[in-house]
Image (cartoon, rainbow, N blue to C red):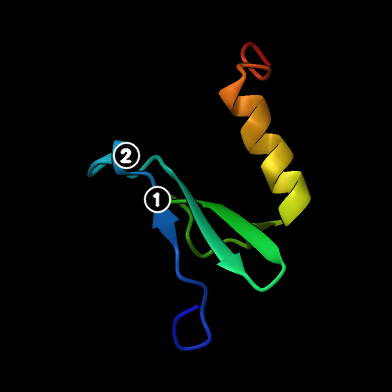
Amino acid sequence: MHRGEPLWRRSSMCGNENECLEVAVREDRVLARDSKEPRRSPLRFTAPVWTQFLRAVNQGALEGS
């Protein structure tokens, strides 16, 4: 966190594009938002659910969804 606000990060793979997923870690939650809509409320995940999501992405389990 930075000055009480989430510190948003995005993948280096995004480059200068504005179509990226941004992620911030806040206490016991992981926040995710669309870089095109930073003012919208972010999605909130618990750490275990976020870990399961990343595992599914890395295994290709969400392709075609």
- The residue that appears at 63% across and 63% down in the rendered structure is 41
User: Where 47 sits versus 12, above or below?
Assistant: below
| Mark 2 vs mark 1, CA separation in Å | 7 Å
Name above or below for residue 42 compared with residue 28. above
Look at 53% across and 86% down and name the residue there.
4
Q: Secondary structure at mark 1?
A: strand
Query: Exactly how many numbered labels are in the figure?
Result: 2
Mark 2–mark 1 CB contact (< 8 Å): yes
Query: Which corner quadrant of the image does residue 45 belong to?
Result: bottom right
Residue 55 image position (x, y, % from top left)? 65, 31
Query: Mark 1 — residue?
Result: 10
- Is disc 1 surrounded by few (<14), some (14 to 19) or many (20+) residues within 10 Å? some
The dot on residue 58 is none
Q: In the image, 32: left or right of 19?
A: right
> Residue 44 at what x, y percent from top left?
71, 58
Q: In the image shown, does 54 or 19 lie closer to the viewer?
A: 54
Q: Which residue is mark 2?
A: 14
Residue 40 placement: quadrant: bottom right
Q: How busy is the neighbourhood of tag 2: few (under 14 within 10 Å), some, or many (20 plus)?
A: few
The quarter in which the C terminus is drawn is: top right
Q: Residue furthest left?
A: 16
Say what amino acid the circle numbered 2 marks.
Cys
Reply above or below: 52 against 61.
below
Q: Secondary structure at mark 2?
A: helix
Instruction: Say which amino acid is labelled 1.
Output: Arg
Q: Residue furthest bottom?
A: 3
Residue 57 placement, left or right of 45: left
